[in-house]
Image (cartoon, rainbow, N blue to C red):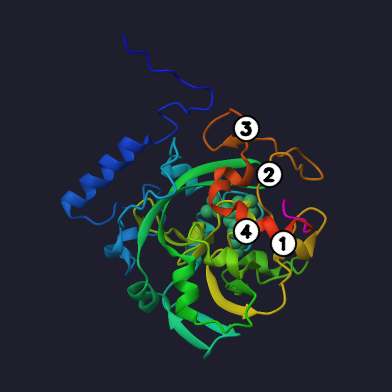
Amino acid sequence: MLIKRIHGWEVPEREATSESAYLNRRGLVKAMGLGAIAASVPGLARAEDDPSAKLYPAKANATYGAPTPMTAEKLATTYNNYYEFDTDKSIYKAAQKLPIRPWMIKVAGLVEKPFEIDIDSLLAKMPLEERVYRHRCVETWSMIVPWSGFAMKSLVEFCKPTSGAKYVVMQTLNNPKVMPGEKDSTYPWPYTEGLAMDEAMNDLCFVATGLYGKPIPKQNGAPLRLVAPWKYGFKNVKSIVSIEFTEKRPVSFWEKLNSDEYGFWANVNPQVPHPRWSQATEKPLGTSDRVPTQLYNGYGEFVAGLYEGRKSEKLFM
Ligand SMILES: Nc1nc2c(c(=O)[nH]1)N[C@H]1C(S)=C(S)[C@@H](COP(=O)(O)O)O[C@H]1N2
Ligand SMILES: [Mo]
């Protein structure tokens, strides 16, 4: 007799969308030609109203595996960190005020020629795909979600940085009228994050423009956000309007606020505690379990090499 073993870290069916259920639904939606399902939460923007809706779902790329169990869509889209709206997790309704068209992205700094491009023109030029990634917040919650978008390296190549470029710096929209959190001047707005060029060029590094086979919801960082899954979640800057190539390492948002607690590299490491809590375990969203956290969030085989020559840096916080 075949007995299905339930591991302690597996979430009950009612709390998680199993991969097969997700894939079935995805196939069904495609077969019905709907393109996207309306968001189930009232008051939320309808994904099919987004001009990019027809681009999703994108073709799956399983190079980095298909981690399970998938976090329920409803959880990943209603439990968010987005300090521009509020410091608590329930910003998904407030975030619907964010206007995402027109959306211009400015490319500047050490590039052959600075330019601006609108999100739909950029989407038309990028090779879209879907990747299921693990996400680990520094606060110790975690999730597994299917992002759609393109490799960060495709974006970098499109920007044509010059040989002097050592870092890529990205910033979130600065608009206190729609983002009330930005009125709080104790924070160093706009939200700024950066990567070393070799990190940005690593194929694991991703730019998400979709989530669960639909355009990415505003609360998750529409219309484009960074996804560097081997780093703590705060590196994944949302709603990007500016990409700048620099010679000097930038100081990121959280690093500026408290460099002892949040560093530039911020690679996930269960053995390096945050000054105020352990990072040894994590709580998958939708569960009350704690599961072991993995070095580089489980992506060491792809990214550990980036840090061979950087052993003297504070790589893990
Ligand atoms: N602009 C901006 N980007 C941000 C944040 C933020 O507050 N503002 N929070 C970060 C943190 S701490 C995490 S864990 C992730 C959360 O992404 P999610 O809400 O899509 O799960 O976004 C990151 N990107
Ligand atoms: Mo986070």
On residue 150, the disc is none
Going by the numbered disc 2, the residue's amino acid type is Asn
Label 2: few (<14), some or many (≥20) within 10 Å? many
How far is mark 4 from mark 2, CA to CA? 15 Å
Number of other residues with Cα within 10 Å of mark 3, as a class: few under 14, some 14 to 19, many 20 or more: few
**Residue 165 percent location from the top left of the image:** 62, 79
Residue type at mark 3 is Pro
- Residue 29: x, y in percent? 23, 49
* First along the sequence among labels 3 and 4: 3
Q: Amino acid at mark 1?
A: Phe
Q: Is residue 302 placed above or below 67 in the rendered structure?
A: below
Looking at the rendering, the stretch of residues picked out in magenta corresponds to 313-317
Residue that badge 1 annotates:
264
Which of marks 2 and 1 precedes in the sequence? 1
Decide: few, some or many residues near mark 1? Use Cα within 10 Å; few <14, some 14-19, many ≥20. many
Q: Secondary structure at mark 3?
A: strand
Q: Nearer the viewer, mark 1 or mark 4?
A: 4
- Three-letter code, disc 4: Leu
Q: Kindly state the secondary structure of the residue where label 1 is placed.
A: loop
**Residue 72 drawn at (x, y percent):** 43, 40
Picture disc at residue 269: 2
Q: Which residue is mark 4?
A: 306
37 and 133: which is toward the camera: 133
